[in-house]
Every structure is written in C-alpha cells, then in structure tokens.
Amino acid sequence: MMARSLPKKLASSLVPAVPYLWLGLFFLLPFLIVLKISLSDPAVAQPPYKPVFDWSDLIGFFGQLDLENFEVLTSDDLYLRATLSSVRIAAISTVLLLLVGFPIAYAMARAPERHRSLLVALVILPFWTSFLIRIYAWIAILKPEGLLNQALMGIGLIAEPLTILNTETAVFIGIVYAYLPFMVLPLYAILEKMDDTLIEAALDLGCPPWRAFWTITVPLAMPGVIAGSLLCFIPAVGEFVIPDLLGGSETLMIGRQLWSEFFSNRDWPLASAVAILLLIILVVPIVVYRDVEARRLETRP
C-alpha cells in the first residue's frame, strides 16, 4: 500500500512544477540571454556582440558587462518618443476595440443558443488565414485608389480620395481588425453566463433599460473587459507588422525601433536593451490585472 501511494504522492508533487519548468525554459532562460546581450557591447563578429560567455573566465566575463546601452536609451529621446507613441496608439486602439467588441459580444450572448457556436466560429474565422496576408489585404483596401475610397466616392460621400494608408488612422484600423477576436471572446464568455433574470427583475421594478444595462450588465462584464483589454493592449504596444505595412515611415513605435536596431543597424546589445524596456512597460498592466483578479476572487461569495 505504501509502495503504491509513494509514486502517486511523487507525481502529485511534480505536477505543480510543470508550469514553473515551462516558465523557466521558455521565459526565464531567454530573458536572461537577452539581458546578458543588453549588457554587452556591439562587435563586428559572429555573434555581433562581446563578451561571449566563457566558463573558464567568469570574472573577466562579468567585468566586461556594463549599462552603456541603457544609458543610450535614457539620453536619446527617440526611444522615449517611440515608447510614448506605442503606449498612446495601443491605448487608443484598446478603447476602439472595446467600443466595437462589446456590442458584438453582447449580441452573440443574446443570440439564440443554437446559433452561438456558429457566431463564435465566425469570430475566429480570420485566424484560419495568414496574419501577414490579411494585413497586406488592407493595403489594397486603404490605398488612394483602393476599395474603400472607391466605395465612398461611389455613394457620393467624398469627391476626392482620402489619404488613409501610411497614417495612424490606418494603424488603428489594422489593430482593431487584427485584435478584435481577442476582445470579443473574453467578453462573450462573461456575458453568455450572465443571469438574465437580474435584468428582468430590474425592468419589472421600473428601471429604464439603459440604466439596467449600465448598473447590472457593465459591472458584471468587467472581468471580460479587463481580460480583453489586456489581451489587446499588451501585444499592440510591441506591434511591428501593422505599423510597418500600414503606418508608413512617420509612425513611430517601439516595435519598429526594435526591428531596426536588430536587423538594420545590427546593434544587438542596444536592441536587447530596447526589448528589456518593452518588457518592463508590459509588466505593469500584467501586475495590475493580477492584482484586480486577486481582489475579485477574494470578494466572490
């Protein structure tokens, strides 16, 4: 009996170690490598930085590491402007995603139950095609002679083509299109489980529909709002493909600076320092979300 229970106890104690092992291998180890490169100096060599890790001379190795690249980030306002621009674009895009995604999720949750699976499948349908191809398709839609301008001119709303491509407006359109499922699905998961009798009771007691929606539906949907907002805001801050293809050269984002330092300037140490800065920016909303979720779970009856 003791011999049988020992493997079970050992297995049950190892199960919690699996996520920590996963985080250690796929987050902590790459993070330490990037951190080490950010403390190195650029070099015309392979790899393009020095010093390279050497077990036989650990004291000399650590003695060559410095904070020079982080000093460059603080002294050059280009990176500060890119960071602030990225946060601004990501925040505005998240608000737009919430304004577009909430009505869609609400309509899906109130649709007949037999249609809900089909609606969820339609929301995730764009993921079945390449992300890059879908963003390229928006170039054909937003360019001056594209489908959008032709449609607006065809119905008489504009007389001349609008300049949308290579502007921040195109970046907002691209982000809202690309990340909309990440906003809709968490909201739908919350709204679909909401007890409809709460709304019916409020209406029976004379509460106007808009007030019932604002005082009952919106507070109950807040976990989905927070989860969807973070799922959209965090990747949007470091977005590279959408601003590069739709925003043109004038759109300044930290993801583009990261790409430029890595592949154009081949300054891996400075690019790694930018990556560390980006990670620090993204850790703040993650910690806030974790704190909000912990408080919500503590107050749950």
Image (tube, rainbow, N blue to C red):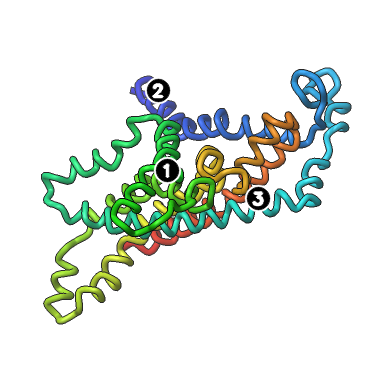
Please name whichever residue, 130 or 182, is drawn nearer the observer in this view of the structure: 130
Question: What numbered label is drawn on residue 82?
Answer: 3
The residue identified by callout 1 is 145
User: Badge 1: few (under 14), some or many (20 or more) residues near its Cα, within 10 Å?
Assistant: few
Which residue lies at the image location 76% right of the left edge and 18% below the top edge? Answer: 46
| Residue type pointed to by label 3 | Ala
| Residue type pointed to by label 1 | Glu
**SS for tag 1?**
loop
**SS for tag 3?**
helix
Can you name the residue that lies furthest to the bottom here? 206
Please name whichever residue, 74 or 224, is drawn nearer the observer in this view of the structure: 74
User: Badge 2: few (under 14), some or many (20 or more) residues near its Cα, within 10 Å?
Assistant: few
Please name whichever residue, 223 or 24, is drawn nearer the observer in this view of the structure: 223
Mark 3 or mark 1, whichever is nearer to me: 1
Which residue lies at the image location 51% right of the left edge and 30% below the top edge? Answer: 22
User: Badge 3: few (under 14), some or many (20 or more) residues near its Cα, within 10 Å?
Assistant: some
Q: Is residue 21 visible?
A: yes
Q: Is residue 52 above or below residue 92?
A: above
Q: Is residue 297 left or right of residue 104?
A: right
Disc 3 and disc 1 in contact, CB within 8 angstroms: no
User: Which quadrant of the figure has residue 174?
Assistant: top left
**SS for tag 2?**
helix
